[in-house]
Image: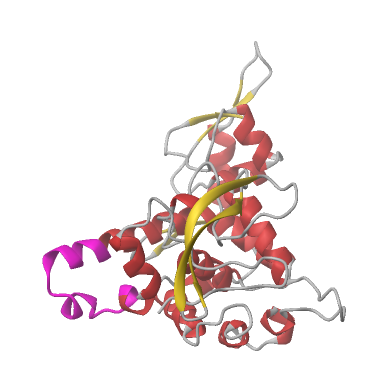
Amino acid sequence: MVYQTRSERHQKRVTFDKKFDKKTVLSLVGTGLVVAPTTAALFPQESYAEEYQVAESEASYLINQISGSAQQIADSNDLYASVMIAQALLESGNGSSSLSSSPTYNLFGVKAYGQEPSIWLSTQEYIDGEFETMNEPFRVYGSYEESLQDHAAVLTSSSYSSGAPNYQGAWKSQTSGYTDATAFLTGRYATDPDYGQKLNSLIEAYNLTQFDTPAQPSDYTYTETSYETTDSVESQESVSEEATTSASSGNTTYTVQQGDTLWDIAQNQGVSLDELMANNGLSDELVTIGQQLTI
């Protein structure tokens, strides 16, 4: 059974858009199995094992893309970055849904209201015990960062009628750990009784608590098995060595290093993420080692 997720302003349910296939459905409704060490034993067919390997690869890719922004946004909003990233993985099918990809960047299936930028998609929604197919408007964001910012706004919002916070029980200051936050969200943010357990499984499998501390000068690079860190002093020296100034144009260029994210580069160079993307004609936050960026 697929359960709907909801908030006071953002009523939304699991969306099956044109890009959803068997792999995505498996990763959505079987998240606990995706991250379990014995997954292959549960699905002996070779094709199923391959599907799950792809799902884990997609999860790793999405974590690399959003972890820097999620850490900054969560820290400034009294939230757990680990929970935020796990929710993004769960609700976007490990980032494989077309809604969560460029150019919409909608990680959480948020529907559009009023004059917000939107895209209409065919979706199946579970209503009164059965699925109904309908076209619904979904919010369009300019980047993953905007989607994460909007999600943080939902978790820190207050009730229009009572003025009481909707999800205060998921805030860092009101909990002793991320498991308290995931337990609070279960039955409130999401009706799925296993919602918290699925988030906890993702957090544990991908060591997402690494991002629950305030951002440090060191660079963090996620891989499927470990996190690689570089000393903050060495990182700063590398930035200084790789940043050069063009005398003719006055523009500063930066060479992308291993472990860099577009968010980190923007912060280190003193520019906004949107400005950095615009200067280099980027439509998403993906960068490659050795790429030259104009600051």
In this rendering, is residue 265 above or below 149?
above
Image quadrant in which the C terminus is located:
top right
Query: Horizontal and vertical percent for residue 46?
Result: 12, 66
Q: Tell me where residue 276 appears, x and y as whole percent.
A: 63, 35
Residue nearest the viewer, comparing 58 with 22? 22
Q: Which residues are magenta?
A: 34-52
Whole-percent x and y of residue 240?
Answer: 59, 37
Q: Is residue 218 visible?
A: no
Looking at the picture, tell me which residue is in the foreground, 146 or 285: 146
**What residue appears at the point 62 percent right and 18 percent down from the top-left corner?**
246
Residue visible at 29% across and 62% down in the picture: 22
Q: Is residue 114 above or below residue 159?
A: above
**Residue 47 versus residue 237 in the image, above or below:** below
Decide if residue 46 is on the left or right side of residue 259.
left
Rendered location of residue 273, percent (x, y): 65, 42
The residue that appears at 59% across and 66% down in the rendered structure is 12
Q: Residue at x 67, y 81 (%)?
A: 170
Q: How is the image coloured?
A: secondary structure
Is 234 magenta? The answer is no
Q: In this rendering, would 295 be left or right of 289?
A: right
Relative to 121, is 79 above or below?
below
